[in-house]
Amino acid sequence: MNRAEYIERLFPADPILCQTVESISQAGLPAMSVKPELGKLLTIFVATTGAKRVLEIGTYGGYSAICLARGLAADGSVTSLEVREEHARLAEANIARAGLTSRVEILLGDALTSLRTLAEGGSTFDVVFIDADKPNYPQYLEYALSMSVPGTVLIADNVLLRDRVLDESNQSPSPVAVRAFNQTWMSHPRLDATILSAHDGFAIARVRN
Ligand code: SAM
């Protein structure tokens, strides 16, 4: 047993999240949801910040959307962006099973298009979780910042790309984009930011007052 497995086994049984994982596997899709400990961290971030408006980029089967929605204040909501209809439909079913349909809206379409629409409409968010295609991470950060308010918490997953970001000679689109994202993330004047090396790299930042 490794560390991650040890911690995972400490979590009390969560039938909703287990069924979500099972539904993804039954659909023949790979296991790309956040792990239980990161899912719980998302719930804790949303709850401790008292977030009412949460944005997620990359819905997949709805696992992290359920975790985010579980932390919401009474009148809060999650807006989750997903490009693949198959993923959005699966997520809708899982979110419904979790009793969270009224709290989560999935916007189907390319995230950059949805983000442009949200930004042009004057939307702001208290928590933003970035977990979609890596080449667009720098643009996702720009949009997240443009729709942030002082105190907004930004979170991004997979910012080490299974260590592919460490090898500067790797000039493929994903590592190049995520390296640029990480540089901006850690040095942006509006952000107090860190990156945890746990899992595949988990980035957390707070927009300064
Ligand atoms: N956050 C999810 C969870 O933990 O339950 C996992 C998200 S999965 C790693 C990435 C998702 O982003 C996939 O469902 C994929 O279809 C979606 N995606 C990829 N590129 C996208 C794009 N350009 N616009 C919107 N969604 C995109």
Image: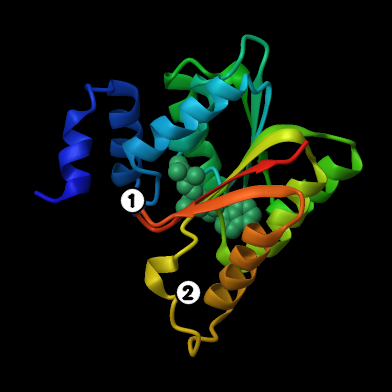
Where does residue 162 sit, x and y in percent of width and height? Answer: 37, 68
Q: Which residue: 48% across, 33% down?
A: 42
Q: Of label 2 and label 1, which has the lower sequence position?
A: 1
x and y percentages locating residue 52 in the rendered image: 68, 21
Name the residue: 68% across, 61% down: 187
Question: Which of labels 2 and 1 is toward the front?
Answer: 2
Point out residue 159 in the picture as x, y percentages from the top left corner.
50, 61
Query: Which amino acid, by three-letter code, is at mark 1?
Result: Ala
Q: Are marks 2 and 1 in contact (CB under 8 Å)?
A: no
Q: Which residue type does callout 2 highlight? A: Val
Q: Residue at x 80, y 34 (%)?
A: 124
**Would you name the residue on which mark 1 appears?**
31
Label 1 neighbourhood size at 10 Å, few (<14), some (14-19), many (20+)? few
Q: In the figure, 76 relative to 44: above or below?
A: above
Q: Residue furthest bottom?
A: 169
Quarter where residue 206 is shown: top right
* Residue at numbered disc 2: 165
Marks 2 and 1, how far apart at CA:
22 Å
Distance from mark 2 CB to nearest ligand 1 atom below 8 Å: no
* Colour style of the rendered protein structure: rainbow
Does residue 63 appear in the picture of this structure?
Answer: yes
Label 1 CB, ligand 1: below 8 Å?
no
Under circle 1, the secondary element is: loop
Residue at 55% in and 22% down: 48
In the rendered structure, the answer to whether residue 133 lies left or right of residue 115 reads left
User: Is 187 situated above or below 15?
Assistant: below
Residue 101's mark? none
Residue 92 picture location, percent across and down: 52, 31
Left or right: 14 as drawn, with respect to 147: left
**Of the pair 189 and 21, the residue shown nearer to us:** 189
